[in-house]
Image (spheres, grey):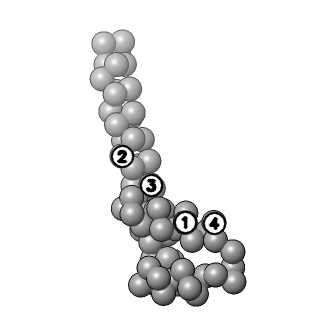
Amino acid sequence: MTEKLNLLLEYQKIPQEENGVWLRKNGLHEEHLAIFQQEIKTLMANKSDDKDKEIKELKKVLLKPFQK
């Protein structure tokens, strides 16, 4: 996943007129970049969901002694 993120970041840095050359050099099509971007967004959303679940569970554990 790190490689895909690095490719996306590198692509965003280059001038637009060099996009085609960069894509060919890296053996990619613009569709690949869109897929990479979606994969990264999904991964980040899942990690956020996992953290929210963990926080909720920890709150339950911490508050349990105070509940009657």
Q: Earlier in the sequence, mark 3 or mark 1?
A: 1
Q: CA distance from mark 2 to mark 3?
A: 10 Å
Marks 1/4 in contact by CB < 8 Å: the verdict is yes
Residue drawn at point x = 30 percent, y = 23 percent: 61
Closer to the camera: disc 2 or disc 3? 3
Q: Which numbered tag is attached to residue 52?
A: none
Residue 18 place in picture, x, y as percent: 64, 81
Q: Which residue type does callout 2 highlight?
A: Asp
Whether residue 53 is situated above or below residue 34 in the rendered picture: above
Numbered circle sitting on residue 10:
1
First along the sequence among labels 2 and 4: 4
Q: Residue at x 69, y 79 (%)?
A: 16
Ranked by sequence position, the earlier of labels 3 and 4 is 4
Residue 14 percent coordinates (x, y): 64, 71
Mark 2 and mark 1 lie on one chain; the one further toward the N terminus is: 1
Q: Amino acid at mark 4?
A: Lys
The amino acid type, in three-letter code, at marker 3 is Met
Mark 2 sits on what residue?
A: 50
Q: Residues within 10 Å of mark 1 (few under 14, many from 20)?
A: few
Residue to which mark 3 is pinned: 44
| Label 2: which secondary element | helix
| Of labels 3 and 4, the one closer to you | 4
